[in-house]
Image: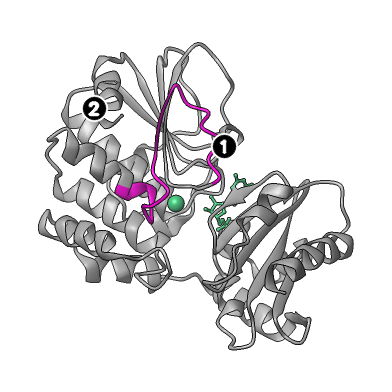
């Protein structure tokens, strides 16, 4: 699978590297790590994301400014990283082949080649394995991008998806030039004022349900404009609510133009990925999400709580 995927990339004329909608450090890190090695192989390659403005926190990633929001016409191969389903790519179907590189249990295997390993904590680790299997040189730039993937999707080595392999790959990436302290600083110590104000709102306004086992927060458009935050600033902030001792599952609803983006987080013992799947989304055992149109926040909240109750009982 790894060899077949790399061969296909070397044969392609124009590769589009796609990161998912509402991008995070894993999707961007894995795409930009691949971008670095493919450029060094002199391949014609375009990095793509649907967003016109990307979350600024990732601006330290190598090649970040190369990411385009327009899709070129002559693409013959799409390589996507960290996308559990095709709708996450936000590109039109056309006459190209797809290599689907991912680590989601809920991946729908939509690629012509599916390089999916759900035992890996991040898509960046799948990319690492692909490069090592094919004896591709990993530069400092590539190592920085892939280390960012690993660090972000493990909550900086905190979550249940961390195992010996995670530390092994992280250690290799450091030996190839990734700087853990610098990456931690870039990702964790450069928050916007808007985001900190949003945290303030969340900590003062969350609700508890079912004897404090479930925490929820709704972030509507008014809160976003009052704090100056955008949807990217809400990323992962729901984890804060999971930190409470009594809480088993925390979720947040963020109002978008057309409905709500829902993010859920659970403690290790509680698998919430099937809840997200039941709403048409996906994710992992302890972090999953979906998007929903046409439902009022209070109704949606009640539906989610009902499903979570079944998981925690
Ligand atoms: P987040 O809550 O940070 O947006 O996402 C948590 C996890 O759930 C990530 O692994 C993400 O890929 C997945 N996820 C979030 N929203 C969706 C969605 O709409 N569809 C699918 N398939 N996965 C999602
Ligand atoms: Mn990921």
Q: Residue at x 23, y 67 (%)?
A: 180
| 143 relative to 203 in the view: left or right | left
Check the image and report above or below for 169 versus 80. below
| Residue in front for this viewpoint, 230 or 147 | 147
Magenta-drawn segment: 106-125
* CA–CA distance in space, label 2 to label 1: 23 Å
Label 2: element kind: helix
Q: Quadrant of the N terminus?
A: top left
Residue with the mark numbered 1: 85
Q: Is 107 displayed left or right of 75 in the figure?
A: right
Q: Is mark 1 within 8 Å of ligand 1?
A: yes
Q: Mainly helix, strand or loop, the magenta region?
A: loop
* Percent of width and height locating residue 14: 34, 17
- What residue does disc 2 label? 3
Please, what secondary structure does the residue beneath circle 1 have? loop
On the rendered structure, is 295 left or right of 22?
A: right
Which of 29 and 286 lies nearest the eye of the viewer? Answer: 286
State the image coordinates of residue 69 (x, y, percent, origin top left). Answer: 50, 33
Q: Was residue 73 drawn as part of the magenta stretch in this picture?
A: no
Q: Are marks 2 and 1 in contact (CB under 8 Å)?
A: no
């Amino acid at each position: 699978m790894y060899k077949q995927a790399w061969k296909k990339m070397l044969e392609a004329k124009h590769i589009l590297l796609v990161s998912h909608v509402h991008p995070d450090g894993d999707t961007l890190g894995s795409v930009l790590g691949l971008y670095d090695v493919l450029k060094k192989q002199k391949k014609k390659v375009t990095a793509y994301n649907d967003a016109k403005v990307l979350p600024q926190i990732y601006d330290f990633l190598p090649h970040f400014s190369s990411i385009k929001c327009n899709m070129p016409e002559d693409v013959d191969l799409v390589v996507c990283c960290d996308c559990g389903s095709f709708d996450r790519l936000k590109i039109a179907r056309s006459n190209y082949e797809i290599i689907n590189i991912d680590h989601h249990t809920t991946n729908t295997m939509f690629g012509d080649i599916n390089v999916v390993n759900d035992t890996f904590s991040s898509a960046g680790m799948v990319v690492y394995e692909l490069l090592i299997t094919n004896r591709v040189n990993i530069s400092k730039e590539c190592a920085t991008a892939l280390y960012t993937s690993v660090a972000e999707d493990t909550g900086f080595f905190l979550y249940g998806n961390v195992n010996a392999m995670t530390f092994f790959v992280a250690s290799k990436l450091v030996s190839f030039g990734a700087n853990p302290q610098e990456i931690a600083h870039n990702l964790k110590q450069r928050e916007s004022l808007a985001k900190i104000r949003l945290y303030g709102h969340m900590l003062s306004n969350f609700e508890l349900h079912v004897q404090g086992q479930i925490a929820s927060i709704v972030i509507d458009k008014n809160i976003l404009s009052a704090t100056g935050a955008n949807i990217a600033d809400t990323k992962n902030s729901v984890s804060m609510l999971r930190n409470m001792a009594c809480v088993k599952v925390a979720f947040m609803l963020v109002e978008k133009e057309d409905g709500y983006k829902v993010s859920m987080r659970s403690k290790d013992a509680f698998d919430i990925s099937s809840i997200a799947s039941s709403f048409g989304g996906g994710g992992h055992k302890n972090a999953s999400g979906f998007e929903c149109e046409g439902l009022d926040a209070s109704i949606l909240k009640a539906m989610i709580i009902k499903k979570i109750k079944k998981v925690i009982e």
